[in-house]
Amino acid sequence: MGVMVLIVAALSLTVPSSFVWIDTWTINPMLGAIMFGMGLTLSPADFKVVLSRPKDILIGCLTQFTVMPLLALGLTWAFSLPQELAIGVILVGCCPGGTASNVITYLAKGDLALSVGMTAASTLLAPLLTPLLVWLLAGTMVDVDTVGMLMSIVYVVIAPIVCGLLCQRFLPKLTKLLTPYLPAFSSIVIAMVVGIVVSHNAARLLTAGLLIVAVVIIHNLLGLAIGFTVGRLLHLQRPKCVALSIEVGMQNSGLASSLAVLHFAAYPLATIPGAVFSVWHNISGALVAKLYSLNKT
């Protein structure tokens, strides 16, 4: 997936016409389709983890919604980012965990149940926490429509997941037929989202490209490192530390780009950090999965 996303990003940057014909409004239905697929694969057991392991989930969500937003704010200050890019970085930091984090945790031999539970919990908390955090961190820069953002997350994330769960419950044969194709489908859709965002902002990205790539890489790597360190400081078992690291470091960056398109259209560059994060965190995720799986200490 990382290779495919990287190829699409490079193509849309060098030949914008390859994706620029697809309008940015399509990002939201695409993200909704991914979330619908997520709903098809979730089971009641995944939500039971939240109730059966409340301490682990609480630690995970608190770390998720404090470390990444504060890192985002700190990086915007440290690099003196232009307002448009700062908004995008903060949006990425305030989003819930990414959907690919569960696969990466599995490959890294981390606590998969904890990873799935954290993704479910942070996604369910996102309609409230993401708009609130964006308002707190970016409200001095721009007007933040917190209610509008809440409704957008409900429409784009929560509603499709619920539809997927209902389909799983009442149309089990259809669900069983679709499930094997979901990973490939999600990978293609994520690559398409990246292509659309990059192609529509190719000229701007070439202007501020190296700066935002550096910020995104630092943001992601610090999130991975701090997540693991928090687990160690709390004396959690290694598989839990691995899951915490990956859940904190990998964000639902597609949602960040979607929210930027919907609510910060006056700041086109705000969509770029989410697109770059989508490319990078799949590469870094594959690398840390290998690292964690080999290193047992």
Image (cartoon, rainbow, N blue to C red):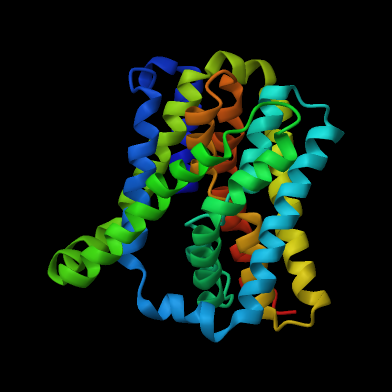
Left or right: 256 in relation to 63: left
| For residue 84, above or below residue 278 | above
Quadrant containing the C terminus is bottom right
Q: Is residue 43 left or right of residue 295?
A: left
- Relative to 91, say whether 221 is above or below: below
Name, please, the residue furthest toward the right: 78
Q: Nearer the viewer, residue 220 or 18?
A: 220
Left or right side of 177 for 131: right
Question: Which quadrant of the figure has residue 47?
Answer: bottom left
Residue at 71% in and 51% down: 68
Q: Is residue 292 visible?
A: no
Image point (52%, 29%), residue name:
263
Q: Nearer the viewer, residue 88 or 202?
A: 88
Q: Position of residue 260 (x, y in %)?
A: 54, 31
- Counting the numbered discs, the total is 0
Residue 281 visible from this viewpoint: yes
Q: Check the image and report above or below for 231 versus 65.
A: below
Q: Position of residue 20 (x, y in %)?
A: 39, 18
* Residue at x 38% of width, y 37% of height: 28
